Amino acid sequence: MNGNAKLDHIDLHILAQLQEQGRITNVKLAGAVGLSPSPCLARVKRLEQAGYIAGYGAQLDLRKLDDVQIVFAEITLADRRREDFAKFETAIRAVDEIVECHLASGEYDYLLKFVTRSVSHYQRVIEALLARDIGIDQYFSYVIVKTAFERSGYPLDSLFPSSHSSD
């Protein structure tokens, strides 16, 4: 199985189960997907080696730790050469408060998600980015007042419905 191999419905079911319960035992996972433990473990190992499983970790509820401020920012670069994108991406990768970076089509180049202690903390971070001369021409900030919901995994059944046609 390589990174481009087509996954079958059992592989997708394994991935869905692991998204929901990263600490599930192999025995429980095997039962949930209808396999015996040994073939289930072999599939998980193949999915890991092929890069479908990027890692395992705990999902944190930051609100339990303290109040945080989420800010989305649309970023437009002054120039749009390959090296301009590379310079920008390299620079922001080192900023801990930026937890997502998406190159987008449309009126702006990037959509960034910041997690900061406050709006003033965000302002200090964005001002530091502007001072670094990494090619930012414009930015627009969207302070998040409330997160109505946030999904922790991907909707595999909706994204890959034909894979379940044999069910």
Image (cartoon, grey):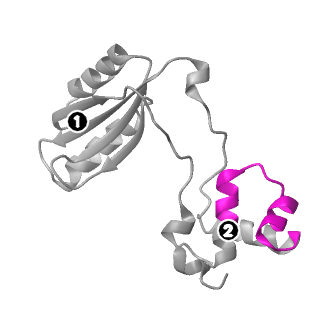
Query: Along the line of sight, which residue is nearer the eye, 44 or 21?
Result: 21
Query: Along the line of sight, which residue is nearer the eye, 59 or 126?
Result: 59
**Crowd rating for badge 1 (residues with CA inside 10 Å; few <14, some 14–19, many 20+):** some
Query: Along the line of sight, which residue is nearer the eye, 25 or 90?
Result: 25
Residue 5 visible (yes or no): no
Left or right: 51 in relation to 134: right
Q: Is residue 90 above or below residue 126?
A: below
**Circle 2 is placed at which residue position?**
13
Residue type, numbered disc 1: Ile
Left or right: 164 in relation to 131: right
Residue 26 visible (yes or no): yes
Give the extent of the magenta segment: 13-37
Q: Residue at x 27, y 42 (%)?
A: 88
Q: Residue 97: percent from the left, percent from the top?
A: 42, 29
Report if the CB atoms under discs 2 and 1 are less than 8 Å apart. Answer: no
Q: CA distance from mark 2 to mark 1?
A: 43 Å
- As helix, strand or loop, the secondary structure at mark 2 comes to helix
Q: Quadrant of residue 148?
A: top left
